[in-house]
Amino acid sequence: MMTRAVRDAANDEAVGILVQPPAEAEQRAAPRQRTLYALGRLLVAGGQRVCTVRNLSPGGVGIELDAPPPVGTAVQIETRGLPLRAAEVCWVSDRAVGLTFVDTPAEELVRAAEATPRSPRFGYEGPVELVTGAGLSECRAIDLGLGGIRVAGALPGAPGDALEVVIDAMLAVRGRLAWDRGDSFAIEFAAPLSTRQLAGAIARWEATLTR
């Protein structure tokens, strides 16, 4: 039977193969920090992309996403605890991508990224429908994340009230009213979106902006 220590070591080795080219694995002067497996927000070519942050170091970050940008592309990357930072694509292997920071962050920022649970929010200024006990209402969203959505306007009920939010024709989510700031309010989803659901919603909304 595989012990936990052996299993963890095997998992770490598999992660290393995923996020960095084998030829460079022995050339890195400083080891990567602990793998994050966190949601990332990648800004590239005027749009935003959903990605998975696999690992992070003061010099760069390993991510995974569909249709990666080519080597040399200037991007910006954000993940939990790490503010939006300029970077450049330094290698691509299938869906795995290595980014090098333009301005290297301090070790403290890397540690904060590992410890901070909040994922980045994605701009999503599209129409949404809210289904409550009072009926159907049309609103406009402000931003969207795995765990919830922020909507412009007055709170349509009391904090804790259950409702359904129809983000677009392909995504309807149950949740509850969370907090109210007067000009906007938040809905917390009953179950987090998957990264593919979030990526799909962002892509469909951004597609409407170019029509």
Image: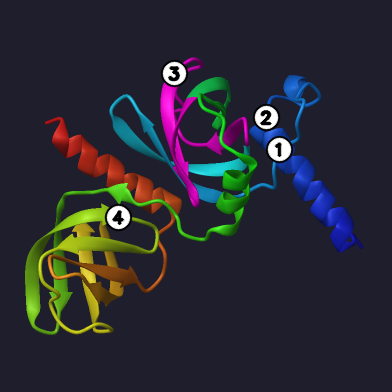
Rounded to the nearest whole Å, what is the CA distance between mark 1 and mark 2? 10 Å
Q: Which residue is mark 4?
A: 144
Which residue shows up at 83% across the image and 55% down it? 7
- Residue at the far top: name it: 72
Which mark identifies residue 32? Answer: 1
Q: Are marks 1 and 2 in contact (CB under 8 Å)?
A: yes
Q: Is residue 184 left or right of residue 144?
A: left
Residue 145, by quadrant, is bottom left
Upstream in sequence: badge 3 or badge 4? 3
Upstream in sequence: badge 2 or badge 3? 2
Residue 31, position in %: x, y? 76, 35
Which residue shows up at 15% across the image and 38% down it? 208
Label 2: few (<14), some or many (≥20) within 10 Å? many
Q: Are marks 4 and 2 in contact (CB under 8 Å)?
A: no
Q: Which residue is mark 3?
A: 73
Rounded to the nearest whole Å, what is the CA distance between mark 1 and mark 4? 30 Å
Q: Is residue 17 visible?
A: yes
Magenta part of the protein: which range? 58-87
Which residue shows up at 22% across the image and 77% down it? 163
Rounded to the nearest whole Å, what is the CA distance between mark 2 and mark 3? 17 Å
Upstream in sequence: badge 1 or badge 4? 1
Which mark identifies residue 20? Answer: 2
Which residue type carries mark 2?
A: Gln
